[in-house]
Image: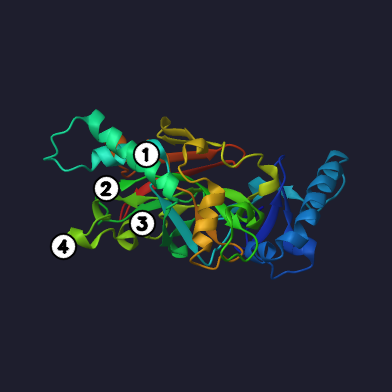
Amino acid sequence: MATLSGSDGVAFPALVTPDQQVLDLGAALGDPAATTRTVLERWAELLPLLHQLAISGAAADAAATDTGRRPLADFQVHAPVEPRQVFQSGANYRQHVIDLHVAHRDPADGRSVEEARAEAAEIMDRRAVEDLPYVFIGLPSAITGPYDDVVLPLWAEKPDWELELAAVIGRPAHRLTVGEALEHVAGYTIANDLTDRATVFRRDMPQIGTDWLRSKNAPGFTPLGPWIVPADSIANPDDLRLTLKLNDRTMQDESTEDMIFNVARMVSYASHTARLLPGDLVLTGSPAGNGMHWGRLLRDGDVMDGSITGLGAQRTRCVAEGAA
């Protein structure tokens, strides 16, 4: 499922078949005002129909009949959903957290890299046992499409990439058990949770802690999509490969198996504080291999290609603010 627009610029929810054909779901459902989010609000009711439309459409296309479908190439692809809430996860991939722990340690720390990594591994083991994921709130206004340019603000000194698996909520949820959590996930999509490393911690008073508003929520800092793939089409969300390439060089290449807290635990944890709503996103953290690890941050002209097994791929180009 996707959000597309044609030459008139009007966005609509769409079913995109594997052979890149598009069906306007608003027209198919007899609801011209439909959006992807309103479809998600009726997810349990409409999912069987969506499967039927996909199957019947494929058969009709094979028979070369008029199905009202058009090639995906005729449309612009937008972020697949406009969520009301975005829940972001930090420090959720074991090797990534260990790398960050080593990279951000006090310059006066006289221990070896091996000792610092061992300490971080012990902390990760303890967190997993105590069941304390790290979740914070992002802004829907930071979301952009999967092929849109990403504007790097002038103030962002160290913009970095963070490819993530995002769970899309399909049923209202509050205080879910881990066993119940995945029943409330409609599907999955790709997110790139950009972060300006220079503003993660307050400069005026580091003791205050992290400043996620400043570091993560510039317009366009969350490329999303291209598709929402139904959860029942993903055999195991805890065994998907995430790959991010920067200018065709692989920077992140890891399985969701490396997550400290899997998808079900993340959704359950978020629901114990907030009431999750259809269309909301639960981003599940990013694996090792970000720019801080490589000593190479984003700059004007960079191209990021992100993909996750079974969820398609996004391609975004970085443009410095004010660049022609």
Mark 3 touches mark 4? (CB < 8 Å): no
Residue bearing the label numbered 4: 204
Residue name at image x 40 percent, y 38 percent: 94
Disc ID at residue 158: 2
Residue under circle 1? 96
The residue type indicated by label 2 comes to Lys
Could you tell me which secondary element the residue under label 4 belongs to?
loop
In which quarter of the view is residue 218 placed? bottom left
- Image location of residue 127, percent across then percent down: 39, 47
Where 252 falls versus 37 (above or below)?
Answer: above
* Residue at x-position 73% and y-position 64%: 26
Side (left or right) of 19 relative to 305: right
Tell me the distance, in whole angstroms, between the alpha carbons under discs 1 and 2: 17 Å
As shown in the figure, which amino acid type bears the numbered disc 4?
Asp
Q: Which residue is drawn at 62% across and 66% down?
A: 172
Q: In this view, does 230 lie to the left or right of 76?
A: right
Helix, strand, or loop for circle 3?
Answer: helix
- Residue 62: x %, y % from top left: 84, 39
Whole-number angstrom distance, CA of label 2 to CA of label 3: 11 Å
Other residues around mark 4 within 10 Å, as few (<14) / some (14–19) / many (≥20): few
